[in-house]
Image (cartoon, rainbow, N blue to C red):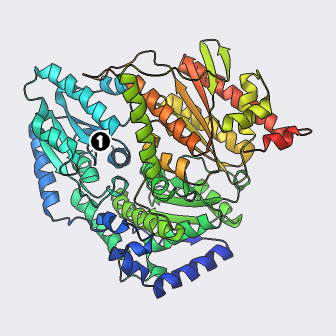
Amino acid sequence: MAESNLMGDVLAPPELRSALERESASWTADERVGRLWQRDPAVWTGGDEGRWLGWLDVPDPEGPEVRRLEAFVHQVHRDGFVSAALLGMGGSSLCPEMLQRIFGPGGGVELRVLDSTDPAQVRAFESTLDIDRTLFVVSSKSGTTLETSLLHAHFFERVRERTGGEGAGARFVAVTDPGSALDRLATERGFRAVFHGEASIGGRYSALSYFGLAPAALVGLDVRLLLTRARAMADACGPESPPSANPGVQLGLLLGLAARAGRDKATLVTSPGLDGFGAWVEQLLAESTGKDGRGIVPVDGERLDDSSVYGDDRVFAATTLYDESDEGREEALDALARAGHPVVRVRAGDRYDIAAECFRWEFATAVAGAVLGVHPFDQPDVEASKVATRAITSQGAAGGRTAPAPPVAALAYDAGVVSAYVERPYSAALRRSVGAEAPLQDWVTAHLRRLRPRGYFAVLAYLEMCDPYRQFLDELRHRVRAATRVATTVGFGPRFLHSTGQAHKGGPADGLFLILTCGHAVDVPVPHQELTFGAVEDAQAAGDCAVLAARRRRWLRLHIDGHVGSGLATVASLVSNALAARARPRRGTRKVQESAP
């Protein structure tokens, strides 16, 4: 195994390097690293931060948690399970998904992760399972996460139908905090096992607790080795390590100081063998720092390109494997550094170092939150979206759903219709630009003309998360980046609501959002409820839009009613035409009007 570079390599412009040295000296003088380890909330906002630092205590590789997991996995193999289906959202699903992508099939069961209410995705996921030989892992810290509860109800009913009700609970495992609704339900239904989380560890910081370790054990990973690597990083970030030589502090200070200086788009680069790590970091950064109008906007999945396509709001953080050298990637990072962009390189010795990198980024995110003056362990705007969704689903279940507002424009294509929706106050600004009875193209063009330097463009897709749609949206985002030089992100709903959704609503107000929704050709009912998965996904999209509007964020929703693939092609054409029109000079007062918020 090659030795990882613990501190990482940092190339930063002189002014940022000087700020980093000054801030490191300040942290030394104030003994802030030691105070952080002592759980002093004054390191942040003086609120309840001290209650949320249980993640600092990495479990003992020889401790009872590991021994219990080893005995549990032995029993799972003995009873003939060949796959595990993890049902969760956010921190409960992103770490297991990351481990599955990085390590692939190992000596354990095959792990699949479902974190969506999209009915097409639920049906596609179910079609891949041999239900009679699948262990279902229901993962939710609170035990009341809407999506997880609905997925649990769906698959428990499927198993109950197969077993006649006898022993259905023995095919389920819960990972949840003690005393939660899921904890109680697991006991009532006779679940095979319940693994309790720590109340002092938030979901996005839970990778090195049972929420990450139980799936790791199921897929056959060496949990002892994972924890050994994580503890080595925790020691390197410990209170005895001065800020200038502390890998977590240095990364966190760099991210926080860069964001304060306007470089608040953290562009994540990973080598192929660490696929999925960027999505995990994306949630950690966005949900932890994006609040009070401040924060770091993580950019995952953008292709590295010539420095000319990037604005001056970027920081690049690359995490790669030693045995995955790529001259093109390294040359591109060198060119970005020469162009004045801060570039951080961390090289992991092997895949098991991912546990160390999880701790490094958890620590760094907490430090960055302190630099930005935000509470890095709450998520107020995520909660606001949940409240809005519950209100809409409750109204629908009671038969009182109100009719949606009519679209502002629509366009027929060969297999359906694309309709545009927008709410006040942003709708008034767009309408001043396009005038009355404007065609759909004009609305899209007016929307994209509001992309600002140092802003970002986010595609929020309430669609099935499948490779064809992902590739389509990736091409769309890169087309926008090439034409505008702004950072771009893509999120599939409702999954992103538990990660970047916080930054969208509570972070920097420079995002421009294109929201994509679709009709449901085939829906899936929720057992024993007057709801379907499609209705829930629609309610989540509507709740997201309502909170974005309340936060005065700028969004346009395009709804595809018909063949989704052809509808996406129509959307791409609309965006391409809008980018071409945006590049053309504008005349008269229209330019002033279209620069309005």
- Where's the N terminus, which quadrant? bottom left
On the image, which quarter does residue 79 sit in? Answer: top left
On the image, which quarter does residue 140 sit in? Answer: top left
Give the tally of numbered discs. Answer: 1
Residue at 49% across, 45% down: 501
On the image, which quarter does residue 110 sit in? Answer: top left
Residue 9 lies left or right of residue 31; in this view the side is right
Identify which residue, 85 or 422, lies in the foreground: 422
Identify which residue, 352 or 431, lies in the foreground: 431
- Where's the C terminus, which quadrant? top right
Residue at 47% across, 58% down: 320
Residue 320 lies left or right of residue 186; in this view the side is right
Question: Could you tell me which secondary element the residue under label 1 belongs to?
Answer: loop
Residue 121 in view of the camera: no
In the rendered image, the residue lying farthest to the top is 414
Residue 342 lies left or right of residue 538; in this view the side is right
Q: Position of residue 465 (x, y in %)?
A: 46, 32
- In the displayed structure, would residue 456 be above or below residue 250? above
In the rendered image, the residue lying farthest to the bottom is 29
- In the displayed structure, would residue 560 be above or below residue 539? above
Q: Position of residue 529 (x, y in %)?
A: 28, 22
Residue at 79% across, 27% down: 435
Q: Position of residue 28 (x, y in %)?
A: 47, 85
Residue at image mark 1: 105
Identify which residue, 477 or 51, lies in the foreground: 51
Q: Residues within 10 Å of mark 1 (few under 14, many from 20)?
A: some
Residue 553 in view of the camera: yes
Q: Position of residue 225 (x, y in %)?
A: 25, 61
- In the displayed structure, would residue 554 be above or below residue 288? above
Amino acid of disc 1: Pro
